[in-house]
Amino acid sequence: MSSNSLVLSTKMTCETWFMEGKLKANEHFVLIDNENLLDTINYFKQHPKQAIEIINNAHHHINQFLNRKKEFHIGILVLAKYFYYSNQLEINQKEILQIFQ
């Protein structure tokens, strides 16, 4: 989604770090199935401005993942929460905040 290509996708069924649940069909990507693939491709060939708008929306979604420092800190917090709730780590809020100093 960070390229200048129009993303064609079937209904997304998994939620990952990429937050697919936040993506909206025909706003961030084009929803397709076996029945509408050729019609959809032809439609966007004839309507390039709409394709570019969807591509730009996809870029906007991607931008939130490009800050390496922020992504690193989020990853640490996710791990800390996982280890805490799986009883593999005893940690309090003060200790978590010290990680980021």
Image (cartoon, helix red, strand yellow):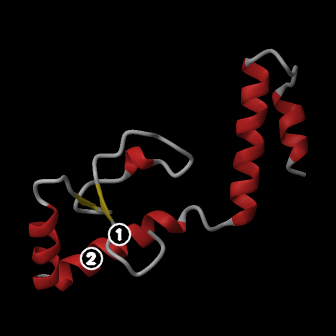
Q: Is residue 81 above or below residue 3?
A: above
State the residue position of label 2: 53
Identity of the amino acid at label 2? Glu
Per the model, the C-alpha gap separating discs 1 and 2 is 6 Å
State the residue position of label 1: 57
Q: Is residue 101 toward the left or the right of residue 1 in the image?
A: right
Q: Is residue 86 toward the left or the right of residue 13 in the image?
A: right
Q: Is residue 77 above or below residue 60?
A: above
Q: Is residue 1 above or below residue 92?
A: below
Residue 98: quarter of image: top right
> Looking at the picture, how far across and down is residue 94, in whole percent?
87, 32
Residue 52: quarter of image: bottom left
> Looking at the picture, how far across and down is residue 73, in whole percent?
75, 51
- At horizontal 72% and vertical 19% (from top left) the residue drawn is 85
Q: Are marks 1 and 2 in contact (CB under 8 Å)?
A: yes
- At horizontal 69% and vertical 56% (from top left) the residue drawn is 71
Identity of the amino acid at label 1? Asn
- At horizontal 66% and vertical 66% (from top left) the residue drawn is 67
Q: Residues within 10 Å of mark 2 (few under 14, many from 20)?
A: some
- Secondary structure under the numbered disc 1 in the rendered image: helix
Q: Residue furthest top?
A: 87
Q: Is residue 68 toward the left or the right of residue 90 in the image?
A: left
